[in-house]
Amino acid sequence: MATENQVNKVLQEADDIIRAHVKKLGPMAGLAVGIVHDGELIYTFNTGFADIKTQTPVTSDTVFRIMSISKTFTAVSLMQLWEQGKFQLDDPINQHLKGLRVEHPDLNAPPITIRHLLTHTSGIGELRKVDPRWLLKPENVVLEDLSVRDVRQTQPLPAYYQGKLTAEIYPGIKWCYCNHAFGVLGQLVADLSGQPFEQYAIEQIFQPLGMTQSDWFLSDIVRNRLATGYQFKDNGFKTVEALLGYQHVVTAGASNIYSSVNDMVHYVAALMNGGRNQHGSILKPETLAQMIQPQFQVDPRLPGQGLAFFLREIGGHRTIGHGGGWPGFISQMLVAPDDGLALLVFTNTSNGAPGLIATDLMRRLLDIPDPATQLPKPGVPEHPELWGAICGSYGPTPGPNTNFRQWTGFGAEVTVLVDGNHLVMRSPDGAYKDGVQLHPVDGNDPLSFEIIVQGAVQKVLFKRNAAGYIDRLQMGTNNFSKRAAPDNLPVAQALYQGQTQLRQQWAKLVYWYMTGMPNKLKAIGRIVLALAVLRLLIRNNRSR
């Protein structure tokens, strides 16, 4: 448990800690931070503006779009119905849905269950379907797949999915973060309860917990206190509404809540108290305990996936949580239920600071040393005799839709190599582009490592197959397979190296196009693409 002395020490230093993060991580229009201890809000930090034009300051009552934190509310709604005996977690989802089916195109595929959807293992990808229009607006493809500019254009979910949502791969074999899974789960809540999903969640979660200033819609309850979302571009803040237009999320179960630090305190208080706060109860303690136990985990030493909640440890202390992201809004909720602590960090700027601030403050509250200062680990030697077997390129299970975030995160491949007499992991772009050293951390397992990425420590494991060959790399909730190595013939080795370099250059190009290419170049690319399509159509017409 966190000691009172340590908590008080961090509270005295928190303003300076947060300001240092803000200075390091770049401009933010506004930021709201709350620390909750034993169900009570004991610290707040608010800086900047909810709206720059009107100079409205951020307060603890400022409303933010907390986006994917909403998934945990969807899971709570569903588990309330589970408590009533409405379904079992391993039931096929199609057994309970009305007007919508979720399935793999292979008729022999295993059924997709409710548990699969709750744990991001359903085999459904990032987008409703793979569409060549990805190439036209890669920077907005997720927004346009999940949302509409005008709430009046919102379709019922069965119509939105045209009656069916198709999985890319078999369920249960791969973790892939999936907004559409939780969109479907919101529909399931509606079908099982007989109420519109949002109405059910408001009546069965918001109201019992005393969350009177939150909503699933841009209603009068939240509109006047809603922060304006910003992106920092060309040395200035630009409103997301001006850049992209207002975006209402169609898949409400995935990410549509509007809330504030003060209102979210009621929710995290219940999460650290068996599903109950001072106002009321939303779950039985044993049900919540099941939700925050690992339901999917590639290795017990790696972070796990609960029912919607992300699970990890900080210095041996269990934490649960979720983040949320949308242009102009980034949010983080991090709870240490056994220690009675929670962090709420919201900003109205596209900036990844909330996750880093929440993790750093929680580590300090728990009196855990900065893990980055603990590497390399004394007394744990490197094993150069294994490096030849470890080195190589590793990638995820094939599937463009289920690998969408791998491509935009780091180029969908990592290469392990020896550099400077150390083992290093590198990616074509993104988080590991510059290479990160693999530090051995377990004297009993020479295939267990840790890396430092953006000041945080991440565990990396290598695994052997039945034949003793090292063929897997595991980190987070992901399994990467080793690309097949050729025999020792010089020609085969040269061909393998050439293929690897070509694949990495292609990954860099895709990453650049989707995340970093200047808009003018994208416009040129779209013109070239349009001309190529036009030429193809003309050829087809002539051939008829």
Image (tube, helix red, strand yellow):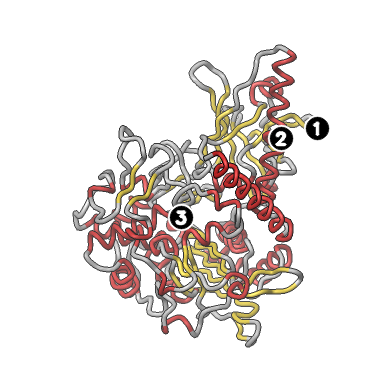
Outermost residue on the top side: it is 489
Q: Mark 2 and mark 1 in contact? Answer it, CB < 8 Å.
A: yes
User: Which amino acid does the dot numbered 2 rest on?
Assistant: Val
Helix, strand or loop at label 3? It is strand
Disc 1 marks a residue whose amino acid type is Gly
Q: Residue at x 35, y 52 (%)?
A: 291
Is residue 93 or residue 242 the one in the foreground? Answer: 242
Percent x, y of residue 312: 50, 49
Q: Position of residue 432 (x, y in %)?
A: 68, 43
Circles 1 and 3, Cβ within 8 Å, touching? The answer is: no
Give the vertical position of 459 relative to 530 (above or below).
above
Residue at x-position 77% and y-position 32%: 419
Question: How far apart, in angstroms, are the residues tagged by discs 2 and 3?
Answer: 30 Å
Q: Earlier in the sequence, mark 1 or mark 3?
A: 3
For mark 3, what is the residue?
Answer: 320
Q: Residue flagged by tag 3: what amino acid is it?
A: Ile
